[in-house]
Amino acid sequence: MEIKKIKPLQQELLVSTALASRRRFISQAGVATFSGLTVSILGSGSASAAMDVTDDAVQQDIRILNTAIAAEHEAVAAYQVGAESGLLEAGVLNVAVQFQGHHKEHIDALAKAVSSLGGVAADTKNSYDFPVEKLKQQSDVLAFAAGLERGAVSAYAGAIPLFDNRDLSAAAASILADEAMHWAVLRNALGLDPVPEAFFT
Amino acid sequence: MFRLSIVLLGLAAAALAAGPVLIDGDPVAGQQVYNRCIGCHSPERDRTGPRHCGLYGRVAGSIDDFDYSAAMRESNVIWDRVTLDQFLKSPSSFIPGTSMGIAGVKDATERSNLIAYLEELSGSSQYCKRME
């Protein structure tokens, strides 16, 4: 129940942040005047930061979001491979499908943010090159998924400091937390320490 | 004493002019750092980012069929210790417009180790040879 409450809010944060960022860019370009609406959405801190926003900064934020979308598409495809492998027990399959659903929701939210910034969201590839020849048993699928989730945590951790719009950083941090939970659950299912360290490196 | 100081200052200036001194990294430690790259990269497969087997010495943006950013394709960069060090330190500063949307590897030792690992993937790596 709690998840249902949080998801729309998270998506709203991404989209409203992106919209506000675009408004700030337009304002800088002299196309429209900076409106009080932006202040009400982002708060005074973000509004003051708008003074430094440039076209390049918006474009960079779009590129970061699209790289994240591309990786999320890959994750959705990977979980599909796992789900169709016939190697997963029913309970594990349910969890895998649930995690895949999370990645789809990440894509939806990130894509809306990109659109709101005036960009075009990255699309899924026609095909993905996965090491399917190494998937012989359930633990292989779980290890494969765990590797992708660990990589996703790294990618978001690397991207978060780079967003010009700090509210996008906050939204990406929320997604990172979700990926980290996936990773921990998969490690636990593999019989590994789900949270091996105090710090992620 | 004054002459010695002049000589030392001259040597320091020459060293600075020559650019950063890149130490030999540890590829084993670099493989650990590489775990941060696996969200988008793999040694042998093109994923969100291009594969890394054969990276060292490769012209940036030159793998056929990989969908690079225009910035990467047009960068005229050849990947070696110096260019990798600069890129990995801050990708978007070294190649503005790159799709590699991460802040970078800020620790110089970690970068050296990572570069050593990438160099190994392009040289003696039996793993990459098996994938060819």
Image: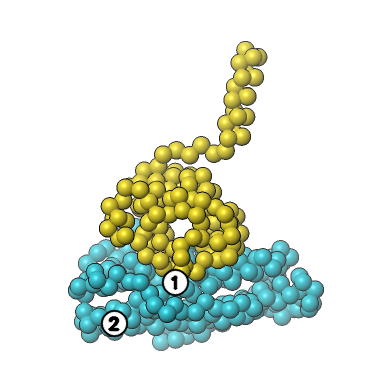
Q: Chain of mark 2?
A: A
Indicate which disc, 2 or 1, sits on the residue closer to the N terminus. Answer: 1
Q: Is residue B87 above or below residue B12?
A: below
Kindly identify the amino acid type of the residue bearing the numbered disc 1. Answer: Ala
Asked if residue B17 lies left or right of residue A51, the reply is left
Q: Position of residue B15 (x, y in %)?
A: 57, 31
Q: Nearer the viewer, residue B129 or A172?
A: B129
**Given contact means CB atoms under 8 Å apart, are the residues at marks 2 and 1 in contact?**
no
Query: Label 2 is placed on what type of residue?
Result: Ala
Q: Colour of chain B?
A: yellow
Q: Position of residue B75 (x, y in %)?
A: 58, 57
Q: Quadrant of residue B112?
A: top left
Q: Which residue occupies 61% across, 19% down?
A: B7
Q: Position of residue A138 (x, y in %)?
A: 21, 75
Tell me the quarter of the image containing the C terminus of chain A. Answer: bottom left
Task: Give the residue drawn at x 52%, y 66%.
Answer: B68
For mark 1, name the chain. A
Quarter holding residue A53: bottom right
Say whether residue B114 is visible.
no
* Residue for badge 2: A83
The chain assigned the colour cyan in the figure is: A
Q: Using the image, tell me which numbered label, if any, was put on residue A71.
A: 1
State which quarter of the image contains the N terminus of chain A: bottom left
